[in-house]
Each structure stands twice: as C-alpha cells, then as structure tokens.
C-alpha cells in the first residue's frame, strides 16, 4: 500500500499526547486560580468584617458615658454594652436598663478571641480572626481607645 494521504499511528499518538499535556496544564492553572480566588475572597470578607466590627466597637466606646472596669462594660444612654467571643463569633450584648431586656448582635464570624478590657484611662480592643491572609499570617486588628471622660 502506497497511500501517503493520512497520518501514521505514531503521529496520532504524539498529537493526542501533546494535546493531553496542554489540557492538563490548563486544568492545573484553572484549579490554582480558583483556589486562590476562594482563599482571597475569604480573606477579604474576614478582614472587612473585623474592620467593621472594630469601627462599631470604637463608635460605641466614644458614645459611652460610664466605663466599668470590674465587668468590662460601657454605658451608652440606657444600655449597658459588652463585647465577648462566643462560638467563634464576636457578640455585642446590650442590656436595656429601662426595660431590662438583653439583646445580642453578631458583629463578626470566624473569631479566635476578642479583647475588650476597660482600664482607668483607656480601653484595649482586639479582634483576632482564624482566617489566614495570603502571607499565611493570622488576621488581627488591635486598637486602644483613650478615655477622656471622668472614670466611674
């Protein structure tokens, strides 16, 4: 047989092998990009939640009229407010002094610990998250609020 118009089996095997290598390389790049996207999205969400929670904590501290160092609470209007970590969530607890009702609000998720220490002239605030950033560091935010009012 002298028909020279087709491919040999070896040429077909080489072409299919090269195509398989290219497809697996593209799938690997897609998988890497997808994992990076998911990790960075989680990081951004956690950082935003931590930053927003810290801003709310600082806002409440600025509005406070009484700072209680014995039970780490602040008084804003008719509410006694405290911040605690519970089930990996940052919880703001408000107790209304008029109606004596207690409400809890989740400010942030994936929290490993929270620092809310009322001292004589300052409040130490810290939020520590469980998510790691792209450099494999834990995400945390700390702040110190200096009390400028009379201490009660």
Image (spheres, helix red, strand yellow):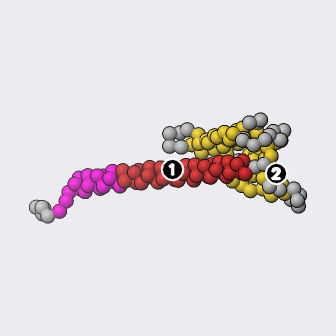
Most common SS among magenta residues: helix
The residue shown at (53%, 39%) is: 136
Residue 133 position, x and y percent, is 53, 43
The answer for how far apart the CA atoms under marks 2 and 1 are is 37 Å
Instruction: Name the quadrant of the C terminus.
Output: top right
The residue shown at (63%, 40%) is: 142
**Location of residue 104 by image quarter:** bottom right
Residue farthest along the left direction in this orientation:
2
Which label number is shown at residue 80? 2
Magenta stretch contains residue 14: yes
The residue shown at (51%, 50%) is: 40
Q: Which residues are magenta?
A: 6-23
Instruction: Name the quadrant of the N terminus.
Output: bottom left
Residue 98 position, x and y percent, is 88, 59
Horizontal arrangement in the rendering, residue 144 relative to residue 137 (left or right): right
Residue 123 position, x and y percent, is 72, 40
Q: Select label 2 or label 1 by which is in front.
A: 2
CA neighbours of label 1 inside 10 A, class few (<14), some (14 to 19), many (20+): some
The residue shown at (48%, 53%) is: 37
Q: Give the secondary structure at mark 1.
A: helix
Q: Earlier in the sequence, mark 2 or mark 1?
A: 1
Q: In this orientation, does residue 109 appear?
A: no
Magenta stretch contains residue 115: no
Q: On the image, numbered disc 1 is attached to which residue? A: 40
Horizontal arrangement in the rendering, residue 10 relative to residue 53 (left or right): left
CA neighbours of label 2 inside 10 A, class few (<14), some (14 to 19), many (20+): some
Q: Nearer the viewer, residue 126 or 138?
A: 126
Q: Nearer the viewer, residue 24 or 17?
A: 24
């Amino acid at each position: 047989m002298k028909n020279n118009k087709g491919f040999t089996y070896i040429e077909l095997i080489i072409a299919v092998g090269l195509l398989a290598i290219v497809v697996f390389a593209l799938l690997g790049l897609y998988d890497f990009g997808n994992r990076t996207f998911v990790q960075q999205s989680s990081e951004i969400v956690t950082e935003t939640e931590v930053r927003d929670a810290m801003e709310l904590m600082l806002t409440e501290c600025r509005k406070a009229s009484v700072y209680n160092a014995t039970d780490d609470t602040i008084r804003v209007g008719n509410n006694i407010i405290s911040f605690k970590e519970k089930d990996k969530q940052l919880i703001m607890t408000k107790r209304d002094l008029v109606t004596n009702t207690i409400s809890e609000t989740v400010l942030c998720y994936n929290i490993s610990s929270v620092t809310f220490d009322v001292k004589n002239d300052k409040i130490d605030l810290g939020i520590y998250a469980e998510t790691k950033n792209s450099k494999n560091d834990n995400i945390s935010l700390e702040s110190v609020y200096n009390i400028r009012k009379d201490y009660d």
